[in-house]
Image (tube, rainbow, N blue to C red):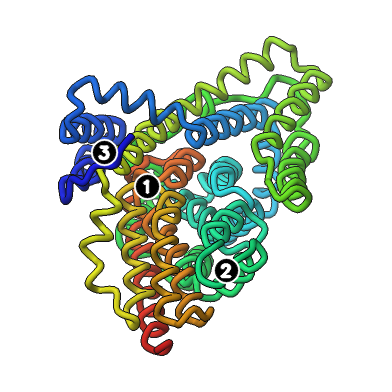
Amino acid sequence: MEVMDLGILSLVPAVIAIVLSFVTRNTVVSLALACLTGTLIAGQGLLGFPTLLKTSLGSTSFAWVMLLNTFIGIIVAFFQKTGAIQGFSQYIQDKKLSRKAVQLVAWFLGMFVYFSDSFSPLFVGTTMRSISDKAKVSREKLSYIADSGAAPVSVLVPITGWAAYLSSLAIGVGVIATQEDAMNLFIKAIPFNFYAVFTIIFVGLIAGGVIKDFGPMKKAEERAIKEGKVLRDGAEPLIGKELTEMEPYPGIKPRVFLNFLLPVMMIVVIAMGTYLTIKSAKTMEAFLFVLIFMGISMFVQGIPFKVIMNTLTDGVKGAVPAIIILALAYSINSLSKTMGTANYIISVSEGLLTPQLLPAIIFIISAIMAFSTGSSWGTFAICMPIALPLAFNLTGGDVTTLVVASFAAVAGGGVFGDHCSPLSDTTILASTGAAADHIDHVKTQIPYALICGGVALVGYLVLGFMSI
């Protein structure tokens, strides 16, 4: 569809979605109204809404996220039906870990499955939920830890799809002629990706109690500790009851290694192995393989075929609440592209792009764009081809600190905005994995993200003035 130039009106759908989400606490209705309003502003009429859904949800990117979320829902159901989650939880509880230790374990688990920002928050939330509940850790806190161990970690590791994607956007710009040149740029930019680095460290300090909770998170944690309520009264966990209330099959022996650790190791080995050998992480294929393996394994262990299929169906049902929000979030993202939101944000900031301010402004623009659209990867695709030529033009074509910092600012800014946005898929998946109320997760996470974003912004300002 042809991109329009609607100026400030292009921001309306995103603003409506975000504001209504906080006011009504009903993300689905807020996103639907935003989509409907956007199609009317774009002159597509009432029938533009179903057309928008049809075109947005027919994309390969949405199909990938939807299928991955569904596969994970099924695997989680298998984990619970075999008693693996319960067995792992009991193992951790037998260690009599403190609240701080439980949070630190969740932090480490997120970094362990760094290869997928979609799998990581679901895996951490699902694995640690019952453990953190018994330790009286609020669901808001668990979803924050799970979310912060996803994209901020993935965007720093050179052997992930994020690295391949970001580096590919740099090929052909300035002196970056090959994939090797681009990957070298990515590696040089790692120390300058301030938001991601600071976020990972900050989460560890928060989890370990070095930095005390503040703001809405402090209230959530006090509620959990004093009242034993891991969710606030009236909260609506972003996950189906099929997954939160599932019981193990009667009489089955909980085999933590066979039914939990081995499947997770298989996913990691297949995803990383395919990336290292064919330069493409086959994450979806890894999950499908593990699903088949677990289905056969469950049958061999004595679980009837009918029960296995019912468990599979319950896993799909449990993933539906998140999929609905993801579908509408993708529709908002598509609508923003059509209405020219990104072009407008860039146009109003062009006059600020001086050499000294370049990395900082790029960081801010990327953050605003990702927050408005809920897509860090979409932000990368738009901002990187603009940021790098500007930086190279100011350095005379040399790969200087300014160029490296500009590359890192796009990556970090995209993650920052995505991290704060209720429209973001990883934010949604973190709420799903932790079974937290989605808006409660966003409200408690934003102050922490803003602290890290503010520190990153100062870092880019210093770099900008030192580079000239």
**Mark 3: amino acid:** Arg
Secondary structure category for the residue under label 3 = loop
Q: Residues within 10 Å of mark 2 (few under 14, many from 20)?
A: many
Residue at the (43%, 64%) spot, across then down:
410
Instruction: Identify the residue under disc 1.
Output: 374
- Indicate which disc, 2 or 3, sits on the residue closer to the N terminus: 3
Query: How much space separates mark 1 and mark 2, taking CA atoms?
Result: 29 Å
Instruction: Identify the residue under disc 2.
Output: 176
Secondary structure category for the residue under label 1 = loop
Q: Quadrant of residue 233?
A: top left
Query: How much space separates mark 3 and mark 1, taking CA atoms?
Result: 17 Å
- From the top left corner, tell me how far across and down residue 106 is, in percent: 58, 54
Secondary structure category for the residue under label 2 = loop
**Mark 1: amino acid:** Gly
- From the top left corner, tell me how far across and down residue 94 is, in percent: 69, 49
| Relative depth, front residue between 116 and 73 | 116
| Relative depth, front residue between 155 and 81 | 155
- From the top left corner, tell me how far across and down residue 149 is, in percent: 54, 56
Query: How much space separates mark 2 and mark 3, taking CA atoms?
Result: 46 Å
- From the top left corner, tell me how far across and down residue 48 is, in percent: 25, 24
| Relative depth, front residue between 263 and 421 | 421
Q: Quadrant of the N terminus?
A: top left
Q: Which mark is residue 25?
A: 3
Number of numbered callouts drawn? 3
Q: Is residue 105 toward the left or the right of residue 368 in the image?
A: right
Residue at the (43%, 52%) spot, across then down:
376
Q: Is residue 285 above or below residue 49?
A: below
Q: Is residue 114 visible?
A: yes
Residue at the (33%, 83%) spot, across then down:
356
- Indicate which disc, 1 or 2, sits on the residue closer to the N terminus: 2
- Indicate which disc, 3 or 1, sits on the residue closer to the N terminus: 3
